[in-house]
Image: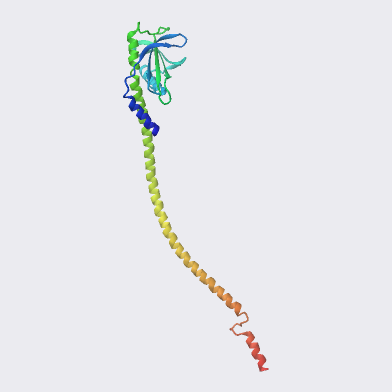
């Protein structure tokens, strides 16, 4: 959540920056040497810029760019934002910043085929259109990043909401358990009282039988009617 907040803060702050400008320059292209190109550096991570460009070109040409020796290539396509002519468009996104301050450098090269690359002097309109197109990327990338941030916020919201709903279910279960526990405590008290009475009764019976045992032990020579046998024998001897 903290990372997401920092991302949102970075996105909001970036809108306060001055518009990022594209430049006409030369780029080393495959094994053909330096060719005319248009470049721009964005305050964004590479994968977000790549995603925006891929979506833009796929939406306009109905084609997916293919990898071509370190570049992405769209061969024989019409990209109205730059020209209505069929062209070969090559682009690449390179890392230009750090993990703490991500930046991405976009390079764009255009050709009419057969290695006929568009130069500013011969095709000023197309090259200028390419410059203006690249300068729309900062806004589009920021919009894409905001959409990602909102998507993450919705995911976090859904997770939090589910946790809240689960807590509600758990609360009902705990309240039911509490009532059942309280009833169990009351039942236990009654059972203990009954058990204590039983213990007292059994202790009394034990004491009674112990006393009976003691009485039998002390009167082991007593006859059936309780007459002392030894005393009766003594009285018989006196009469003789």
Is residue 209 shown above or below 23?
A: below
Taking the image as shown, residue 136 lies to the left or right of residue 65, namely: left
User: How many numbered circles does the render carry?
Assistant: 0
Q: Quadrant of residue 163?
A: top left
- x, y (%) of residue 180? 41, 54
Q: Nearer the viewer, residue 148 or 202?
A: 148
Residue farthest bottom in this picture: 240
Q: Nearer the viewer, residue 32 or 179?
A: 32
Asked if residue 178 shows in the view, the reply is yes
Q: Residue at x 43, y 60 (%)?
A: 187
Residue farthest top in this picture: 122
Q: Residue at x 37, y 42 (%)?
A: 165
- x, y (%) of residue 29? 44, 11
Asked if residue 80 shows in the view, the reply is no
Q: Residue at x 39, y 43 (%)?
A: 166
| Quarter of the image with the N terminus in it | top left
Residue farthest right in this picture: 240
Is residue 83 shown above or below 15?
A: above
Q: Quadrant of residue 113?
A: top left
- x, y (%) of residue 222? 61, 82
| Quarter of the image with the C terminus in it | bottom right
Q: Nearer the viewer, residue 15 or 217?
A: 15
């Amino acid at each position: 959540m903290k990372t997401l907040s920092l991302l949102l803060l970075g996105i909001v702050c970036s809108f306060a920056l001055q518009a990022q400008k594209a430049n006409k320059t030369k780029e080393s292209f495959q094994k053909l040497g330096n060719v005319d190109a248009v470049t721009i550096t964005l305050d964004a991570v590479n994968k977000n810029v790549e995603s925006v460009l891929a979506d833009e070109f796929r939406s306009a040409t109905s084609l997916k760019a293919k990898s071509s020796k370190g570049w992405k290539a769209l061969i024989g396509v019409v990209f109205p934002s730059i020209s209505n002519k069929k062209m070969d468009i090559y682009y690449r996104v390179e890392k230009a910043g750090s993990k703490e301050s991500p930046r991405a450098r976009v390079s764009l090269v255009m050709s009419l085929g057969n290695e006929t690359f568009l130069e500013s002097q011969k095709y000023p309109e197309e090259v200028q259109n390419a410059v203006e197109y690249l300068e729309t990327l900062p806004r589009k990338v920021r919009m894409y990043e905001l959409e990602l941030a909102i998507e993450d916020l919705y995911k976090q919201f859904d997770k939090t909401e589910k946790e809240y709903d689960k807590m509600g279910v758990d609360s009902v279960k705990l309240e039911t358990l509490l009532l059942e526990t309280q009833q169990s405590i009351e039942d236990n008290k009654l059972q203990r009282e009954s058990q204590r009475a039983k213990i007292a009764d059994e202790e009394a019976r034990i004491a009674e039988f112990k006393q009976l045992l003691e009485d039998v032990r002390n009167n082991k020579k007593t006859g059936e009617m309780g007459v002392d046998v030894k005393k009766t024998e003594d009285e018989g001897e006196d009469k003789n």
